[in-house]
Image: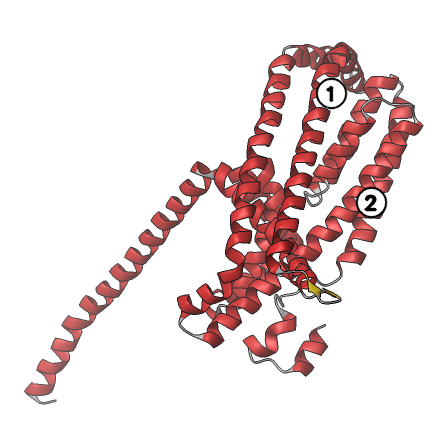
């Protein structure tokens, strides 16, 4: 080896560690920046939770009615045609009336529960303590003492306060929906000008349409199944002559929007209410079993049958999403967890670098089968085989 080659090799060895250290520093800096950005996003999600929850609900309501408005605007009655503006105003008015009606219904049912719960407080404590007596008499006394130490009146006042906040949240959602309807006429133009590419704007529009279609299908099926479950619970409680049939039906309807967990909570609450009122464990167990069968048939048989392949999300991913958004936004976050997860999965499936996330969130590892041919270059034969 010549002196020149030795000098060149030594210089290469001295430079290599420096290059590696620069790469390592760059990766470390990237990780730190990612952690800081994620922390800031979490802080903003928590700090602005009231506004963000209202905005997400408004977007979902707007998306559910946008396709219907487009369909109605194409209808003709003789020479008269329903314009987009008239259809939008009619849809906005309908949404406002429905939201205010539902809010009034929920508030009235909450007030009913708050005013009548005090009469059942002692009876409820005795009934719950009697359940602990199956284990030992000491457990019965301990459970009764523990429950009586709870300030029920403070929790009832908190519940009433949350119900009153519902009206302000409903008003904010209606305002958001109104502004979204006002902006919908220029959305496509803004999207093209923003992306400076008509083809790219059309691709983004297809992604948005896919999200809207799946979320709408999910919400329509959930609404139908939840309504049927609530009616069945109402008939069940009226058949046994139980109080709180109306509030329990409303609570069941609302909780059924929370996958898996909501139906379990609703059934347990119904069993406890029955035990408190009838003071007979056998009757309470019978009502609990019937309610559980109703929840199982409608939630585990009818719901998946109607849902079909529209919701290709992982069951484990749903639980993680419920825990994450429940920790950030509380009970409203649990209601919105599945629509947000569906939207995130579809968006990630169209971004090559984020596609592994979509694969993990999907049920079969195929997050967007119906559009794989245009997005990922998969042949239609492969898609049919996957289905």
- Kindly report which numbered mark, 2 or 1, lies closer to the viewer in this rendering: 1
Q: To which quarter of the image does residue 116 belong? A: top right
Residue in the picture at 77% in, 43% down: 226
Compared to 135, does 224 lie above or below? Answer: below
Q: Residue furthest left?
A: 3
What element does badge 1 sit on?
A: helix
Mark 2 and mark 1 lie on one chain; the one further toward the N terminus is: 1
Whether residue 195 appears in this view of the structure is: yes
Q: Which quadrant holds residue 256?
A: top right
Decide: is 99 above or below 109. Answer: below
Residue tagged by mark 1? 112
Q: Considering the numbered disc 2 on the image, is that residue within a helix, a strand or a loop?
A: helix
Location of the C terminus by quadrant is bottom right
Point out which mark residue 296 bears: 2
Give 155 or 27, whichever is nearer the viewer. Answer: 155
56 sits left or right of 269 in the view = left
**Quarter of the image where one finds residue 373:** bottom right
The residue sitting at 67% across, 53% down in the picture is 315
Q: State how the image is colored.
A: secondary structure
User: In this rendering, does residue 314 appear at all?
Assistant: no
Q: Position of residue 329 (x, y in %)?
A: 53, 38
The residues tagged by marks 2 and 1 sit, at their Cα atoms, a distance apart of 29 Å
Where is residue 206? Give x, y as percent.
Answer: 57, 69
Q: Nearer the viewer, residue 106 or 361?
A: 106
Depicted 270 relative to depicted 292: above or below:
above
Q: Residue 76 vs residue 290: left or right?
A: left
Mark 1 burial class by Cα count in 10 Å: few <14, some 14-19, many 20+: some
In the rendered view, tell whether residue 304 sits above or below residue 93: below
Q: Position of residue 345 (x, y in %)?
A: 57, 60
């Amino acid at each position: 080896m010549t002196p020149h080659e030795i000098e060149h090799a030594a210089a290469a060895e001295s430079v290599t560690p420096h290059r590696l250290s620069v790469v390592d520093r760059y990766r470390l800096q990237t990780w730190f920046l990612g952690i800081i950005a994620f922390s800031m996003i979490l802080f903003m999600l928590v700090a602005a939770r009231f506004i963000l929850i209202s905005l997400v609900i408004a977007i979902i309501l707007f998306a559910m009615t946008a396709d219907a408005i487009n369909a109605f605007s194409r209808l003709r009655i003789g020479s008269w045609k329903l314009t987009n503006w008239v259809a939008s105003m009619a849809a906005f008015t309908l949404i406002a009336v429905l939201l205010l009606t539902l809010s009034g219904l929920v508030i009235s049912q909450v007030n009913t529960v708050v005013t009548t719960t005090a009469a059942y407080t002692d009876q409820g404590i005795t009934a719950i303590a009697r359940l602990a007596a199956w284990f030992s008499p000491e457990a019965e006394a301990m459970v009764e003492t523990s429950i009586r130490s709870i300030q029920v009146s403070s929790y009832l006042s908190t519940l009433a306060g949350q119900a009153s906040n519902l009206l302000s949240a409903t008003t904010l959602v209606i305002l958001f929906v109104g502004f979204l309807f006002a902006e919908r006429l220029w959305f496509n133009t803004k999207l093209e000008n923003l992306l400076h590419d008509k083809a790219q704007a059309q691709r983004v529009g297809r992604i948005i349409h896919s999200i809207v279609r799946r979320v709408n299908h999910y919400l329509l099926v959930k609404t139908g199944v939840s309504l049927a479950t609530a009616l069945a619970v109402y008939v069940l409680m009226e058949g046994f002559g139980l109080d709180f049939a109306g509030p329990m039906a409303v609570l069941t309807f609302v909780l059924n929007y929370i996958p898996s967990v909501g139906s379990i909570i609703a059934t347990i609450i119904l069993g406890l209410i029955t035990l408190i009122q009838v003071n007979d464990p056998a009757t309470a167990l019978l009502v609990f079993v019937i309610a559980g069968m109703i929840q199982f048939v409608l939630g585990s048989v009818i719901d998946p049958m109607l849902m079909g392949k529209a919701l290709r999300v992982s069951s484990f991913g749903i639980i993680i999403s419920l825990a994450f958004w429940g920790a950030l936004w509380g009970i409203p976050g649990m209601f919105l967890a599945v629509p947000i997860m569906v939207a995130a999965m579809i968006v990630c499936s169209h971004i090559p670098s984020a596609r592994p996330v979509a694969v993990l969130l999907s049920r079969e590892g195929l997050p967007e089968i119906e559009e794989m041919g245009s997005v990922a270059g998969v042949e239609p034969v492969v898609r049919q085989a996957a289905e």
